[in-house]
């Protein structure tokens, strides 16, 4: 606990530690021992305990020995350190006399703790009162001396008794689980805690030594000492005795408690503050050291360092300096370290005033003369000091420099040491690498590391204190150097003082000797110099020295570090607003040379691997240059040369990712920096140069913003009213107002003129087009495109949008369209590349505006839609069939989903959807979203009435889908199940929803190709082919879409209707047969795709047309008899026909009766029970539907068909005809009744032809039929009898 916290509870503490003794003795004055004990009191009178004294002793001055009554001379300190009895010859009796009362030696401190400490406080206060009331009357001097001495001795005796009691009688505390059984045991267990509380009360009572009244502190300077001392002298030394005894008691208590922490429980409960023996000991040591050193400084004042230096020389040399022995120990283990430590801490104390307040200005003169001698000794090569010693020395030098001001001699001495040890790692093995393992892997990190050395923290800060552990000695030296160079009002003198010493240590031999660690230290040194001194001079010298490194023999790792250092200098140039062209050009030449070696096929793979280290460092560094440059007008483009054209083709996959990532960074930084002139910009917009100037000025630093905002209107008026010369004037005003020097009077480089900025940006763009874009074009058709390829291509597209004139001639006059054709619309591109690329672009509002109506955009939106549809269709070409959920597959799915969202937001697509009244929000996945879009296009076309609009819509729709059959052709070859399903389903949606559109003369060729390629391919028509199972499976699912669409196309086609109808019938016939089972099966028939295509809950003209076509196909291809032989699979066909009729509610007799004649023939000629049953059911359904359509009267159409059936079979199958008609008569007698005249006439004609008279058998069959026809039948039978 700190003393500041204890002061706040002092008053609370004294509430339960009263100083007034009247209450303590009000009950009785009986001594705390029995009378029998008093008889033996004289046996245990202790000797006088040791104490602090500066009293005169004869011969002490000459011999230099310590006081005979002191702690050292009496052996008290030695016994304390050796853990011996503090006073072996004292307190041996049963009782002891303390404060004029006898006490039992072994129990007094336990039983009367508070009473004894109360008496102690009473004696101290009495001595203080004696000091206050003392006078200069020599007559009273003797009495005051002896009274004050007696009071002091009683207090010292009590403190000595506490030490002895703790050593001899105090037992370690019992565990918390044990409950004391006797009050004395309980009090004994609480004694350590009570002692800590009482010791705190003593320290609070007497206070700090530095706070003693002036009349007490004056006792330190008594010159002519005699045998009589004033009470102030006794009080001062009693304070010293008490402070030291408190430390002794706490030390003995910790030993006796075997390291167990003792808490002051009562204090904690009352105050809430934590107090332990450890915290009290630490506070006491800290306060005592500070007070004693402060007293010494106040006493010696100006000649303080002369005294300290003399003492330190004794420590350093090990022998007294001069005739007088100061009495210091001569066995210091590390005299140099101790000397540095003491010097630094004394100097730090010297930065405080008499009130203990830290001051900016030093309160004590510096001691550089002694420090320089000590520094040279510490850095002496003969001593071979280790890093742990050197780091401590340099840390102390930094602290002294911050407190006393820089010293050029100290800097020179340290540089002399480090110039010889640059290759050292400066690590401390036992300390580990915590905080020291950070390697500057990029130029920006290297520069930041150097900058961290240029702003050393204050001495009292935590970061300064931790420097010993957080950084090495060389970095601390750089802080000293930076502090020296950063002196205010020095006019460049510090740099001139040290410049020659620094430069002279480097030459070609020395540069070639540098290891990677040495080169890192070299770079950090010159970066610190560049930051704090003359940047251009330092950078020039650094580059000249680095050029001395041989290009052929320098290891790649060292070359990488060299480039990082040079790029860090480029970053510093940009920060200062200086043109970095010379530095960039030199560095780019090195890069180009390394890239050429990397490109050559003769270079060994191991060498290429090693070369990648500097090349990747260059990429990272140049990225940081472009990222940190405020406006890209300081010749940054010179870092981009032909080396990239050699590097990119030679990169492997991982290396290419890094290179393309670098390209993205540069492109991204160039776009925000584009600066159109005040005239028309790149896209015809007028941009105010003031807006650019304001942005450039603001980039100088956030501290300029507030002032600029207040002066904004005036600045704008001044600039807009004048010429570009005003820009320079305004820039100078910003500099002057903000206290910053202007780099150039005429044209400050960090705020470029708009024309100059545009020129520089054109140069950067030209470098990118020249050295990067050709490689991207060469990679665009790769089947394994790197992910960054699309990002980089999108970056170039946006660059062409901002700066179209910068694009090469082969992309003109419409560079955006040319690039999008190469990377987004080309049908040979990988879907992952296309989706990634278009996602980048369609998220950009400016690009979408160009796509919608920009110059040269043409059919850009339609081409984007086509690319989207192609990518959706071809997604399974690039997915692993064995692992469809692979990382690449998931990436493509994510990109497709995003592209779907972007395409649906295109203005043209939104318009189509809006006109069609469709909302794709629910269709988030690509496949259903594509179906919604296809449906919207078809619906929008159907709603158009004007011929020209319909023609344009057809052309646009064909642009949307492109050569869709080409997109899905790979699936037809590789038989991918998922791919075929997607392909057939998509084209099926197209045929169904675009049926009107596809029937036009412009689009019918696409429809014909769809039928030929997907529905009626030659290979698929081979019945015995088993290699097309996947195709048939996919076609089966989508066939209803095709049939429905083709049926509509047949009905609306004006030129090729007959051919389309023929094709439709071929498709129906082909797949009706394909998917019919060999034997009747309810499941197979019910789910037949042709049946599913024809079924609808509510009849529509389109559905009726399709069913008519299906019935015609059934009649022509599936129900025809070959002579007397029935058609194959007749039962299955009849089952299909029955299901078709059942699942639709058609009422048109012309439709229903299409298969009736052949069904009647089946009923007549086939005796198979299943066929009989199915034929009967079909006939019944047809007759019922036809009759229901015309009411109760016989259906004329049905009657006509029956009459034709009878005519066709009369004379051959007469009896079978009557059997069939019996079936019809049972179902609907009115229909057959209408045929009675015709049937009777037919019978008589047959008998006449045969010439045999009446045919009894035939007439009997006819009579059975007539018997089913009611009255009309009976009448006809009578008529027949009359024949």
Image (cartoon, grey):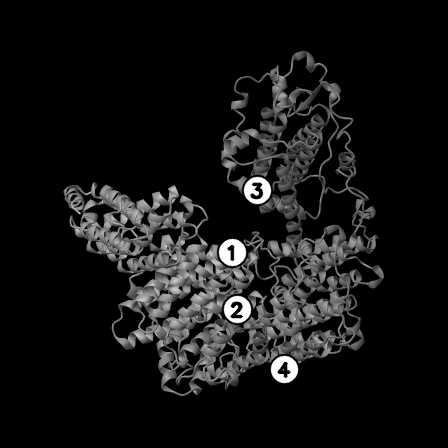
Q: Nearer the viewer, residue 712 or 1026?
A: 1026
Q: Which of marks 3 and 4 is nearer the N terminus?
A: 3
Image height of 586 relative to 436, above or below: below
Circle 1: is it few (<14), some (14-19), or many (20+) Cα within 10 Å? some
Front: mark 3 or 1:
1
Q: Where is residue 508 in the image (x, y as percent from the top left)?
A: 78, 77
Report the residue marked by disc 1.
Answer: 1030
- Find the distance from the CA under tag 2 to the CA under tag 1: 37 Å
Report the residue marked by disc 4.
Answer: 582
Image height of 82 relative to 661, above or below: above
Asked if residue 451 lies left or right of residue 321, the reply is: left
Image height of 378 relative to 204, above or below: below
Asked if residue 951 lies left or right of residue 523, the reply is: left
Q: How many marks?
A: 4
Q: Which of marks 2 and 4 is nearer the N terminus?
A: 4
Front: mark 2 or 4:
2
Q: Nearer the viewer, residue 325 or 148?
A: 325
Q: Where is residue 1017 in the image (x, y as percent from the top left)?
A: 48, 65
Circle 3: is it few (<14), some (14-19), or many (20+) Cα within 10 Å? some
- Find the distance from the CA under tag 3 to the CA under tag 2: 64 Å
- Find the distance from the CA under tag 2 to the CA under tag 4: 31 Å
Q: Earlier in the sequence, mark 3 or mark 1?
A: 3
Q: Nearer the viewer, residue 994 or 256?
A: 994
- Residue at point 40% right, 73% down? 1005
Q: Assign a secondary structure to mark 3.
A: helix
Report the residue marked by disc 3.
Answer: 3
Front: mark 3 or 4:
4
């Amino acid at each position: 606990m700190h003393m500041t916290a204890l002061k706040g509870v002092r008053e609370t503490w004294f509430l339960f530690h009263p100083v007034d003794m009247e209450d303590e003795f009000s009950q009785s004055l009986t001594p705390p021992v029995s009378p029998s004990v008093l008889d033996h009191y004289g046996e245990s009178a202790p000797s006088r305990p040791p104490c602090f004294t500066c009293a005169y002793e004869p011969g002490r001055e000459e011999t230099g020995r310590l006081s005979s009554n002191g702690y050292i001379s009496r052996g008290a300190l030695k016994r304390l350190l050796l853990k011996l009895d503090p006073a072996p010859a004292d307190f041996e009796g049963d009782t002891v006399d303390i404060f004029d009362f006898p006490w039992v030696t072994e129990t007094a401190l336990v039983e009367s703790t508070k009473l004894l400490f109360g008496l102690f406080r009473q004696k101290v206060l009495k001595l203080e009162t004696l000091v206050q009331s003392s006078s200069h009357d020599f007559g009273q001097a003797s009495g005051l001396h002896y009274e004050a001495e007696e009071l002091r001795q009683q207090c010292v005796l009590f403190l000595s008794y506490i030490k002895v009691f703790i050593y001899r009688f105090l037992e370690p505390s019992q565990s918390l689980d044990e409950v004391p059984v006797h009050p004395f045991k309980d009090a004994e267990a609480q004694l350590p805690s009570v002692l800590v509380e009482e010791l705190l009360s003593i320290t609070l009572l007497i206070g700090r030594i530095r706070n003693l009244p002036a009349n007490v502190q004056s006792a330190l300077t008594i010159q002519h000492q005699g045998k009589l001392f004033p009470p102030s002298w006794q009080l001062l030394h009693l304070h010293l005795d008490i402070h030291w005894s408190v430390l002794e008691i706490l030390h003995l208590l910790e030993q006796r408690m075997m390291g167990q922490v003792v808490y002051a429980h009562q204090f904690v409960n009352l105050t809430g503050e934590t107090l332990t023996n450890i915290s009290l000991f630490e506070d006491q040591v800290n306060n005592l050291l500070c007070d004693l050193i402060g007293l010494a400084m106040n006493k010696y004042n100006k000649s303080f360092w002369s005294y300290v230096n003399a003492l330190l020389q004794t420590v350093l040399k090990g022998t007294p300096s001069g005739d007088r022995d100061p009495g210091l120990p001569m066995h210091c283990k590390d005299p140099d370290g101790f000397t540095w430590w003491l010097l630094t801490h004394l100097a730090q104390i010297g930065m405080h005033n008499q009130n203990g307040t830290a001051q900016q200005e030093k309160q004590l003169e510096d001691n550089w003369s002694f420090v320089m001698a000590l520094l040279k000794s510490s850095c002496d090569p003969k001593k071979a000091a280790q890093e742990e010693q050197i780091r401590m020395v340099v840390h102390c030098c930094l602290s002294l420099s911050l407190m006393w001001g820089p010293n050029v001699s100290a800097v020179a001495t340290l540089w002399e040491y480090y110039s010889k040890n640059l290759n050292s790692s400066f690590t401390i093995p036992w300390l580990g690498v915590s905080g020291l393992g950070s390697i500057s892997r990029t130029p920006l990190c290297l520069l930041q590391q150097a900058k961290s050395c240029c702003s050393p923290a204050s001495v009292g800060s935590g970061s300064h204190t931790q420097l010993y552990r957080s950084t090495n000695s060389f970095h601390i030296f750089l802080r000293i150097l930076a502090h020296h160079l950063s002196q205010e009002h020095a006019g460049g003198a510090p740099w001139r003082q040290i410049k020659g010493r620094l430069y002279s240590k480097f030459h070609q031999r020395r540069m070639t000797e540098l290891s990677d660690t040495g080169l890192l230290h070299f770079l950090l040194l010159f970066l610190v110099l560049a930051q704090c001194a003359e940047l251009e001079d330092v950078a020039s010298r650094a580059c000249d020295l680095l050029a001395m490194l041989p290009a052929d023999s320098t290891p790649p790792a060292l070359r990488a570090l060299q480039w990082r250092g040079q790029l860090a200098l480029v970053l510093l140039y940009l920060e200062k607003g200086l043109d970095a062209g010379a530095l960039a050009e030199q560095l780019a030449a090195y890069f180009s040379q390394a890239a050429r070696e990397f490109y050559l096929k003769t270079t060994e793979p191991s060498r290429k691997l090693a070369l990648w280290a500097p090349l990747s460092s260059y990429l990272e560094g140049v990225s940081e240059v472009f990222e940190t440059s405020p406006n890209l007008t300081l010749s940054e483009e010179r870092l981009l040369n032909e080396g990239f054209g050699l590097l990119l083709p030679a990169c492997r996959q991982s290396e290419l990712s890094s290179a393309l990532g670098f390209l993205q960074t540069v492109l991204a930084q160039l776009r925000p920096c584009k600066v159109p002139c005040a005239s028309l910009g790149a896209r015809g917009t007028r941009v105010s140069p003031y807006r650019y100037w304001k942005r450039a000025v603001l980039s100088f630093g956030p501290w300029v913003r507030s002032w600029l905002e207040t002066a904004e209107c005036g600045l704008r008026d001044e600039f807009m009213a004048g010429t570009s010369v005003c820009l320079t004037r305004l820039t100078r005003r910003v500099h002057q107002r903000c206290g910053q020097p202007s780099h150039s009077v005429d044209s400050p480089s960090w705020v470029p003129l708009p024309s100059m900025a545009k020129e520089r940006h054109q140069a950067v763009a030209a470098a990118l087009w020249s050295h990067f874009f050709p490689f991207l074009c060469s990679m665009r058709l790769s089947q394994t495109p790197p992910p960054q390829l699309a990002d980089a291509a999108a970056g170039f597209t946006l660059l062409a949008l901002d700066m179209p004139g910068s694009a090469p001639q082969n992309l003109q006059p419409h560079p955006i369209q040319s690039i999008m054709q190469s990377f987004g619309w080309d049908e040979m591109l990988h879907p992952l590349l296309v989706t990634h690329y278009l996602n980048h672009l369609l998220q950009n509002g400016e690009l979408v505006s160009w796509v919608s109506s920009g110059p040269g955009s043409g059919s850009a939106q339609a081409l984007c839609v086509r690319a989207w549809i192609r990518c959706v269709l071809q997604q399974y070409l690039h997915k692993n069939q064995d692992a469809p959920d692979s990382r690449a597959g998931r990436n493509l799915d994510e990109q497709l989903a995003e592209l779907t969202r972007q395409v649906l937001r295109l203005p043209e697509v939104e318009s189509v959807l809006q006109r069609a009244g469709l909302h794709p929000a629910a269709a988030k996945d690509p496949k259903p979203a594509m179906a919604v879009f296809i449906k919207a296009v078809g619906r929008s076309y159907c709603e158009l009435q004007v011929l020209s609009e319909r023609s344009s819509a057809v052309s646009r729709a064909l642009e949307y889908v492109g050569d869709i059959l080409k997109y899905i052709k790979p699936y037809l070859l590789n038989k991918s199940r998922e791919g075929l399903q997607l392909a057939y389903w998509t084209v099926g949606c197209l045929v169904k929803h675009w049926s009107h559109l596809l029937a036009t003369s412009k689009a019918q060729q696409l429809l014909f190709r769809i039928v030929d390629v997907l529905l009626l391919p030659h290979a698929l028509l081979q019945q015995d082919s088993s290699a097309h199972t996947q195709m048939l499976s996919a076609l089966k699912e989508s066939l209803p879409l095709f049939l429905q669409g083709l049926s509509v196309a047949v009905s609306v086609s004006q030129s090729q209707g007959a051919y389309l109808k023929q094709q439709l019938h071929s498709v129906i016939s082909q797949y009706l047969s394909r998917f019919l089972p060999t034997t009747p099966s309810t499941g197979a028939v019910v789910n037949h795709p042709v049946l599913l295509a024809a079924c609808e809950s509510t009849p529509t003209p389109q559905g009726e047309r399709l069913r008519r076509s299906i019935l015609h196909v059934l009649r022509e291809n599936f129900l025809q008899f070959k002579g007397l032989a029935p058609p194959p699979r007749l039962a299955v066909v009849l089952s299909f026909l029955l299901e078709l009729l059942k699942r639709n509610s058609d009422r048109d007799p012309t439709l229903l009766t299409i298969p009736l004649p052949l069904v009647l023939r089946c009923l007549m000629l086939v005796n198979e029970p299943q066929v009989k049953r199915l034929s009967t059911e079909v006939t019944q359904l047809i007759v019922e539907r036809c009759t229901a359509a015309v009411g109760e009267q016989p259906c004329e159409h049905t009657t006509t068909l029956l009459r034709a059936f009878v005519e066709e079979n009369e004379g051959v199958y007469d009896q079978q005809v009557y059997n069939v008609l019996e079936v019809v008569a049972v179902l609907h007698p009115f229909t057959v009744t209408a045929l009675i005249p015709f049937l009777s006439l037919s019978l008589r004609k047959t008998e006449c032809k045969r010439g045999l008279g009446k045919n009894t058998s035939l007439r009997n069959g006819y009579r059975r039929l007539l018997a089913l026809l009611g009255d009309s039948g009976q009448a006809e039978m009578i008529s027949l009898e009359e024949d």
